[in-house]
Image: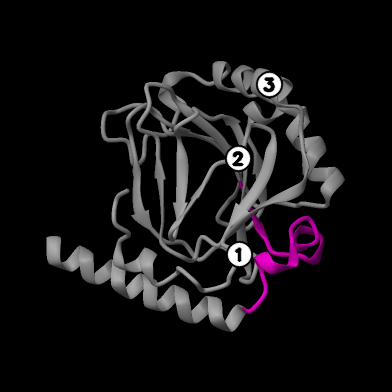
Amino acid sequence: MTALLPWQEMMVGSGLMLSAASSIGVEAALLEQQVQAAIDSVPEEQRNRFGSPNGDWTAITLLHKDHRGRKVEHPPLAHIPILTDLLRNAGIDPFGLYITRQPPGVDLKWHFDHQALHLEICRLLLPVRVPADAFTWIGHEKVAHPPGTLWTGDFSLPHQVENRTDQERIVIAIDSVVTPAIQALFPAAQYADAASRHALAQHAINALLRARAKTA
């Protein structure tokens, strides 16, 4: 077993829930069918490639907020009614929706985001296509949920997404302001003890930044 990195070690024994599946989900086969239709509708030149080490596309925007704060729906979203139905029925009003793609053999290296259920903003994830050996490290925990399962994590903590397989990984990312309706979809332990989470995140981030500085 590979030794834990310093920012992983400090999360062991914290007693905090680092990720959780929600109480809702969708039918996996229909989700994949509709998402593939959305992908097929987008010309190659309109597919985002940020963060890609080899030029492969990494994201397609379904909804975003413009510079005036207005929500803008993109045409591919119309191909995924199973997603819009899920959001409406769950009372989720996102400001960002994206089809994210992790190409085969590509890792999204250790990083951190100001997104968690105890903060103002959260990211919810809806897996569409997940290879058996693809997963997310959140601290010291390996996380993987089957297609159609809405889940989230404390992404204010350092996390890394690995796909060391020969298949692509596709997940819908849902960015939203945290609301009681969203919190109610998850175990209360996922957003409990905000003070401890803030402190742990700061210590873990500092450890990650120190490691980065040594290799810079």
For this view, does 35 lie left or right of residue 186? left
Q: Tell me if residue 211 comes above or below residue 86 in the rendering.
A: below
Q: Tell me if residue 161 comes above or below residue 163 in the rendering.
A: below
Q: Which mark is residue 145?
A: 2
Alpha carbon of mark 3 to alpha carbon of mark 2: how far?
A: 19 Å
Position in image of residue 81 (x %, y %):
77, 28
Q: Are marks 3 and 2 in contact (CB under 8 Å)?
A: no
Q: Is residue 187 magenta?
A: yes
Position in image of residue 129 (x %, y %):
56, 27
Q: Which of the 4 quarters of the picture holds residue 115? A: bottom right
Position in image of residue 41 (x %, y %):
58, 17
Q: Amino acid at mark 2?
A: His
Please state, as top left, top right, bottom left or bottom right, where the C terminus lies in the image. Answer: bottom left
Tell me which label, 2 or 1, sits earlier in the chain: 1
Residue that mark 3 sits on: 34
Q: Amino acid at mark 1?
A: Met
